[in-house]
Image: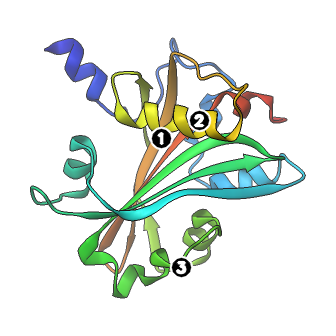
Amino acid sequence: MLARLRHETWLPRPPRASVPASLRPWLTDSASLTSRIRARCTRFSVRVLAQRLGAAQLDEAVFLGLNPGERVWVREVLLLADDRPVVFARSLLPRRNLRGAWNLFHGMGARPLGAALFADPAISRAPLTCKRFDARDARYHRARSALAEHDAAASMPRDVWARRSLFRRHGRALMVSEFFLPAIFELPR
């Protein structure tokens, strides 16, 4: 039970012993991830994998304060630096929040969500948390599949680190989780 609880716990900061030093700044920098990646590549792009009504994972539902069975708008994308997938991002918006405060979310297309989030002064961000994911989690498999679809030669490590936080606009929450793929280590510091 304790091992399962540790596996499911999001941490307020990455543990020094288990996170590569080169990954720590990516997990802890609360500025725009989109801007950080753009500054380290020639061409930044977003590949939309899914934009649909769906279900949240249990920890996501708890984090968002969802009612049992409540549907969410799910947006999954790959962030590409010079055509290399560096981040698998998963954003969830409770269906009830699609109109009004977050109406921009529905029509994002291939535009980076981060650019919109950090450009709007009405949006606030909660502190980042981080977690290591492995094959026991469906999101790990989704990230691995997305990576393989983009580049059949790319391999996924046994585990990946992710970070997440809540963004609020007029009291309404949007959750963004970002899973760091192996090519993130190839970007200049």
User: Which residue lies at the image location 59% right of the left edge and 35% below the top edge?
Assistant: 180
Foreground: 108 or 37? Answer: 108
The mark found on residue 121 in the picture is 3
Left or right of 89 on screen, residue 136: left
Left or right of 81 on screen, residue 101: left
Marked residue nearer the N-terminal end (1 or 3): 3
Disc 3 marks a residue whose amino acid type is Pro
Q: Which residue is mark 1?
A: 163
Left or right of 16 on screen, residue 22: right
Check whether the beta carbons of the residues at disc 2 and disc 3 lie within 8 A of each other: no
User: Which residue lies at the image location 51% right of the left edge and 11% below the top edge?
Assistant: 17
Check whether the beta carbons of the residues at disc 2 and disc 1 lie within 8 A of each other: yes
Label 1: how many Cα within 10 Å (few below 14, some 14–19, many 20+): many
The mark found on residue 66 in the picture is none
Q: CA distance from mark 1 to mark 3?
A: 22 Å
Which of discs 2 and 3 lies nearer the camera? The answer is: 2
Q: CA distance from mark 2 to mark 3?
A: 27 Å
Q: Secondary structure at mark 3?
A: loop
Disc 1 marks a residue whose amino acid type is Arg
The mark found on residue 180 in the picture is 2
